[in-house]
Amino acid sequence: MKTLSIVIPAFNEAENLRPLMATIPISELHRGGWKTEIVVVDNNSTDGTGDLARHLGARVVFQPTKGYGNAYHAGLTAARGDVIATGDADCTYPFDALPGLLHAFDQHEVEFLTTNRLLRANRHAMKISHTLANHLLSGISRSLFRNNVKDSQSGMWIFRRYVWERLRVESGGMAFSQEIKNAATTAGFRFSEVPIEYRPRGGEVKLNALPDGLGNLRQLFQHRFRKIVPVPMLPVLPQPTDPAPLTRPAARA
């Protein structure tokens, strides 16, 4: 079967984990030929996020250094699937749409698929100020990187694991999301973008709009004009004769 890792960064998201995990269609993915693991990155939570994720059947990776990008660095490196899917732990992203997104990923024959939340139908799920900021950052990103990505800040992506292994993504904060897209397109990986439903956030909002927005803006220019250092090709290691299976989440109560 094909192998899929669903990587979810989480900082104090215990109240959202149970409804979130309930939306991940493990059985449907299995019927579609995907052997799936769920990797939750506990970003030094204080509300029992890691313990609850483990109880719900996820494999938990602990990242003590706070930051959205830092959590992803840990989670993506730990992922064991040949394909990786991502999304936030705040119930905004449609994990139940993964079968369709994976079909689009295969149909488009791409190596990196990102998603667009900035649709009229999703206006209720995001503050007007955040919508405008997302459009502004995405417009600047398109101008700098010429990749026609409509939503540079979206946090739901599907990509081949070797893409991550070949990218040099430096951001430890919120700018990670735009950087991984721009790095992938600059590196020449086959790339596409599809629309998704975006949902109202569950629980406490953790985005610091102004400092995060300014940090993302600064990162765009630093990334565009920094010296490109080629990432060395990783050696192909022999596969064990009996590889450890991906963890299949236990049945949830």
Image (cartoon, rainbow, N blue to C red):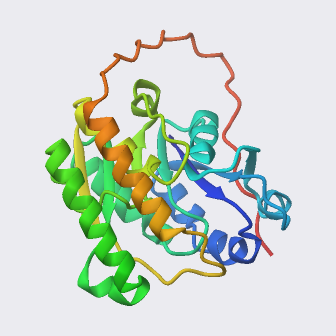
In the image, is 45 to the left or to the right of 198?
right
> x and y percent of residue 197 in the render?
37, 77
Residue at the image position 61 percent from the left and 70 percent from the top: 206
How far across and down, in percent of the image, does residue 139 sit?
19, 60
Q: Nearer the viewer, residue 2 or 87?
A: 87
- Residue 203 lies in what quarter of the image? bottom right
Viewer-side residue, 165 vs 212 = 212
Residue at 57 percent of width and 52 percent of height: 68
Residue at image location 18% in from the left, 45% down from the top: 144
Residue 54 location, x and y as percent? 81, 56
**Apparent side of residue 48 relative to residue 93 in the rendered image (left or right):** right
Quick check: 229 above or below 183?
A: above
Q: Is residue 183 shown above or below 71?
A: above
Residue 157 visible at all = no
User: Residue 49 falls in which quadrant of the image?
Assistant: bottom right
The residue closer to the viewer here, 155 or 252, is 155
Residue 135 falls left or right of residue 238: left
State whether residue 5 appears in this view. yes
